[in-house]
Image (cartoon, rainbow, N blue to C red):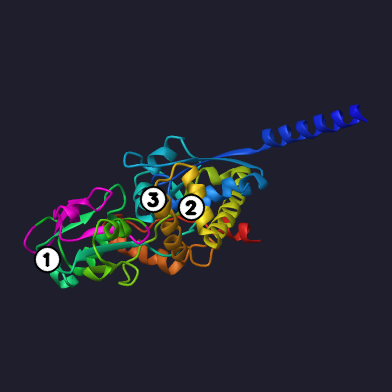
Amino acid sequence: MKKMMMAFLAGSMAMAASQAMAADPVTLQLKWVAQGQFGGYYVAKDKGFYEDEGLDVTIKPGGPDIAPEQVIAGGGADVIVDWMGGALVAREKGVPLTNIAQPYQKSGLQLICPKDGPVKTEADFKGHTLGVWFFGNEYPFFAWMNKLGLKTDGGKDGVTVLKQSFDVQPLIQKQADCISVMTYNEYWQAIDAGFKQEDLIVFNYTALGNDLLEDGLYVLDTKLKDPKFKENMVKFVRASMKGWKYAIDNPEEAAEIVMDNGGQDENHQKRMMGEVAKLIGDGSGKLDMATYDRTVKALLDQKIISKKPEGAYTADITSAALK
């Protein structure tokens, strides 16, 4: 009996090892550091959703000096999280990025200004300093200013653009009249820094119809020609969206999982998960074509890209993942 049990255990271990060896490796490059913004991916890994699909997923955090487009172009990732503006610019420059899923169906981008400052409405922007993130995050802002007919060269007929740090210091130190924030992150940093919600004027990109697509999943279109890679991306998207749905239903647990993977400030991560949940939409990961068309038009109007992109997205992956 003992020998039979030993043989059974040995067989089970061998099977587990075989399954682990059979798992296909996939590397995901995030757009920023480990935080609730990417909670769905961390949950999918922690809960074994990727493993259930036969995938061994490595999640690489980003940072201020990490450009996901460059990472994937250099072979350092199979799939990246990116904003569509940055992805389409990279595509035009020769990095053939293709959107395979769009977990974030709404934008979290805002511009905030103190009520006791000089900016009360869009009409007040002219002649003032506005804080903007770069590294691919600037495109929605420039498209918005173009829509308003405002130059961004610092002249009297336009606005002065401050290359903003990824925090709220420019507002605290009065370096800018308004700054960029995300609904799920820097907005709450401003509140924690002492600004009261009722004392802030908020310009929400989505409410103003200026929202461009944010955190989507992108791969190199050349790799999609490989049936095995394409199959793995279907599995990856299916498991990722399962992770997002779990994170939305269990935000506190999701925040704890993010903390276990390098997130900072548990209360902040819990609050972030609650705000991110509002941006995921129906949880399908499907790309909304109306928002895609608006994103492309805004980039073309501002001459951020010079021509309408071809092959910049595919619905094949999400369609297969949803079956």
Residue 309: percent from the left, percent from the top? 39, 56
Residue 302 visible from this viewpoint: no
The magenta span reads 155-184
Quadrant, the C terminus: bottom right
Residue 199: percent from the left, percent from the top? 22, 69
Amino acid type of the residue tagged 1 in the rendering: Lys
Q: Earlier in the sequence, mark 1 or mark 2?
A: 1
Amino acid type of the residue tagged 3 in the rendering: Ala
Amino acid type of the residue tagged 2 in the rendering: Ala
How many residues crowd mark 2 within 10 Å: few (<14), some (14–19), many (20+)?
Answer: many
Mark closer to the observer (1, 3): 1
Residue 93 visible from this viewpoint: yes
User: Is 179 part of what is drawn in magenta?
Assistant: yes
- The CA distance from mark 2 to mark 3 is 28 Å
Q: Are marks 2 and 3 in contact (CB under 8 Å)?
A: no
What SS does tag 2 mark?
helix
Residue 99: percent from the left, percent from the top? 47, 54
Is residue 61 shown above or below 313?
A: above
Q: Are marks 1 and 3 in contact (CB under 8 Å)?
A: no
Q: Nearer the viewer, residue 116 or 306?
A: 116
Q: Residue at x 7, y 58 (%)?
A: 155
Residue carrying label 2? 255
Residue carrying label 1? 126
Residue carrying label 3? 87
- The CA distance from mark 1 to mark 2 is 40 Å
How many residues crowd mark 1 within 10 Å: few (<14), some (14–19), many (20+)?
Answer: many
Determine whether, in the image, residue 73 is placed left or right of residue 43.
left
